[in-house]
Image (tube, rainbow, N blue to C red):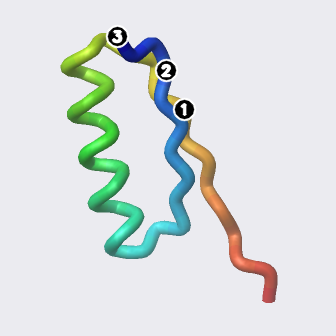
Amino acid sequence: MLRSILVATDASSAANRALALAIEIAVKHEARLDIVYVVRDL
């Protein structure tokens, strides 16, 4: 059973799809979801 999920995102379309999937999984398993927003170094 999952207790927590960590998702890193950069707000790209691929990352947003991964985040949506992580949300579904977290809800299904009643797991904690931590999200880290990654900023690209310019």
Q: Neighbour class for label 3 at 10 Å: few (<14), some, many (≥20)? A: few
Q: Amino acid at mark 3?
A: Met
Q: Nearer the viewer, mark 1 or mark 3?
A: 3
Q: Earlier in the sequence, mark 2 or mark 1?
A: 2
Residue drawn at the location 30% of the way across and 11% of the way down: 30
Query: Mark 2 highlights which residue?
Result: 4
Residues under numbered marks 2 and 3 in contact, where contact means CB atoms less than 8 Å apart? no
Query: Which of the numbered marks, if any, corresponds to residue 1?
Result: 3
Residues under numbered marks 1 and 3 in contact, where contact means CB atoms less than 8 Å apart? no
- Tag 3 secondary structure: loop
Q: Position of residue 21 (x, y in %)?
A: 25, 45
Q: Amino acid at mark 2?
A: Ser
Q: Quadrant of the N terminus?
A: top left
Q: Neighbour class for label 2 at 10 Å: few (<14), some, many (≥20)? A: few
Q: CA distance from mark 2 to mark 1?
A: 8 Å
Residue drawn at the location 34% of the way across and 71% of the way down: 14
The answer to which quarter of the image holds residue 31 is top left
Residues under numbered marks 2 and 1 in contact, where contact means CB atoms less than 8 Å apart? yes
Q: Position of residue 39 (x, y in %)?
A: 69, 69
Q: Nearer the viewer, residue 2 or 34?
A: 2
Query: Mark 1 highlights which residue?
Result: 34
Q: Position of residue 24 (x, y in %)?
A: 21, 34
Q: Residue furthest bottom?
A: 42
Q: Residue furthest front?
A: 1
Q: Nearer the viewer, mark 2 or mark 3?
A: 3
